[in-house]
Amino acid sequence: MIEKLVDYVTGLIPRSLDFVISLVIAIAILVIGGKIVKKLLTMLRNSLLKKDMEPGVVSFLISALKVAAYVLLVIIAAQVLGFATSSIVALVGSAGLAIGLALQGSLANFAGGVLILLMKPFCVGDYVIVDAVEGTVQKIDIVYTTLHTADNRAVILPNGKLADSNIINATREDRRRIDINVGIEYSQDISEVRKVLLDIANSQEERLAEMPIDVVVSSLDDSAVTMAVHMWVKPEDYWTVRWRMLEEVKNQFDAHGIVIPFNQLDVNLNQQ
């Protein structure tokens, strides 16, 4: 018994020393590797920001790489300690699959946010139209995008749905065309109407002088000749000029005796 105990203790000392050495190496891998990862991620972050990449995308990518790097360090340290790395990899894979299935919608929003921030179909301050919603982009997060409507309502859109939708960016370009259609009676003089509409368009101080003004007959309808006015302004002046022009068209047509036809209903009463 004593001899067996002595042999066991004698054999335990080398094994303990081996475990202590392996533990020290594993700790060194985690500590030194963590510092190296932190340094490399800082360099990568600064490099991406210098390339004018969106801060939200940079933060997301750095966070994802940080998690992946630390998981790799833990697997290497576990291998040094003698653990079966295949089991650890299988456990991590199973956990990742379970989390992915549980957060399927959120991951779709994450992916949509990354695409929006990378491709930049719109930026903060742009006026966009998405399906039946339109407004000014207030904030772009990695999961949601916030729009402010004209009546100051906040609309929160998930990026996953937003990335799959048709987006109209009304302020991306440096100019925008105002299109105003107005109907006149067939008996009206088109030349006179064209002159009135041109005078209204030319009187707008916000119009872009380098761009032409078009006043054309756009269609011949059942009860009216539709005249169209096309004029270019800066995006921020669009609504102000459009609303003013509509009011001036009505006032000038009344002043010049130009009639805007409208549908009328005749009711005949048959009295016995």
Image (cartoon, grey):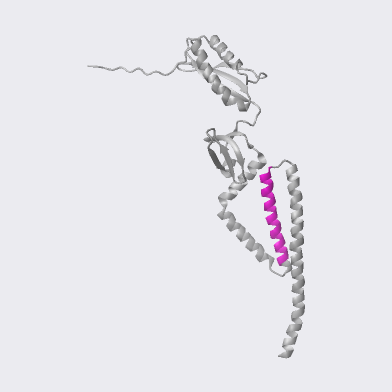
**Observer-nearest of 56 and 121:** 56
Residue 100, image quadrant: bottom right
Main secondary structure along the magenta-highlighted residues: helix
Q: Residue at x 51, y 18 (%)?
A: 182
Quadrant containing the N terminus is bottom right
Q: Residue furthest front?
A: 152
Q: Quadrant of the C terminus?
A: top left
- Relative side of 241 to 265, left or right: right
- Residue 101 visible here: yes
Image location of residue 52, percent across then percent down: 72, 40
Q: Is residue 194 left or right of residue 48?
A: left
Above/below status of 200 relative to 38: above
Picture quarter containing residue 175? top right
Q: Per the image, is 69 magenta?
A: yes
Residue at image x 74%, y 76%?
A: 16
The answer to whether any part of residue 164 appears in the image is no
Q: Residue furthest left?
A: 272
Residue nearer the viewer, 188 or 49: 49
- Tell me which corner region of the image, top left, top right, bottom left or bottom right, holds residue 234: top right
Magenta stretch: residue 57 in it?
Answer: yes
In the image, residue 80 above or below residue 165: below
* Residue at figure coordinates x 76%, y 53% from the top left: 40
Depth check: give the residue in front, 248 or 108. 248
The stretch in magenta equals: 54-78
In the depicted structure, whether residue 141 falls above or below residue 27: above
Q: Position of residue 101 (x, y in %)?
A: 57, 55
